[in-house]
Every structure is written in C-alpha cells, then in structure tokens.
Image (cartoon, rainbow, N blue to C red):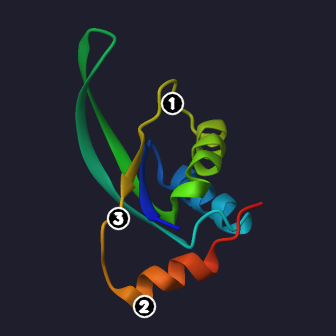
Amino acid sequence: MSICQIQVVVNDEQTATNIVDALLARRLIACGQRSGPVSSRYWWKGQQEQAEEWVVMLKTLEELSDGVIDLVSQMHPYETPEILVLPVSGGNTAYLQWVKDEVVGE
C-alpha cells in the first residue's frame, strides 16, 4: 500500500471545506488541509488569467486515488480542475502508518 498526496486547487474556501468533508466522510482520505488564498496566474483558452484560489492537500493511498479524483471532479466548479496525484517516497514511519490505518474507502 503506497501513500500519495493529492493536490487540488479551488476557487473558494467553502468549496475546499466541502471537498475535504465529503472525502473524510467516505474514508477516502486520512486528512486534508486547505491553505489560501493564493494568487494564481495561468493561461486559459489563449489568454492570461489571474484568480484567488485555495490549495487543498489530501493524504490517501494510491489505490484510492481514482475514487478521490472522481469525487473531487464531481464537486469541483471548474471545467478543467487541477487534481494532481503526487507519490510519497518516504516520511515519518508512524505518520505513514496512520494514513494507512485511517483510510478504508467506500
């Protein structure tokens, strides 16, 4: 069982909270943190854009990442949401075990 961190960026604080709460309720993540607002500058449909956004970091197992992506995609207001799965190659052994113990999936 490999652990991953999933990064999501959303347009408001309440959406970030709703996503984390829904994933926790389904035991698809062990925890989620949100930070922001952050200032994002990016290309969208041929034009430079700027937005205030919140970053959400989710801790889960790689085998549950597809379920996390599916639920986040359903709840996300963007046409093309940023959802990135980042592998965890190491860390505090006790913390990594805690993540494994806390997620069970649906």
Residue indicated by mark 1: 78
* In-front residue for pair 20/60: 60
Residue type marked 1: Tyr
Number of residues whose C-alpha sits closer than 10 Å to that of mark 2, classed few (under 14), some (14–19) or many (20 or more): few
Q: CA distance from mark 2 to mark 3?
A: 14 Å
For the residues marked 1 and 2, what is the alpha-carbon distance in whole angstroms? 36 Å
Q: Is residue 70 left or right of residue 65?
A: right
Residue type at mark 3 is Val
Q: Is residue 2 left or right of residue 89?
A: right
Q: Which mark is residue 88?
A: 3
> 29 or 3: which is nearer to us?
3
Q: Quadrant of the C terminus?
A: bottom right
Q: CA distance from mark 3 to mark 1?
A: 27 Å
Q: Which residue is mark 2?
A: 94
1 vs 2, front mark: 2
Q: Nearer the viewer, residue 48 or 60?
A: 60
Specify the quadrant of the image occupied by residue 57: bottom left
Q: Residue at x 62, y 56 (%)?
A: 18
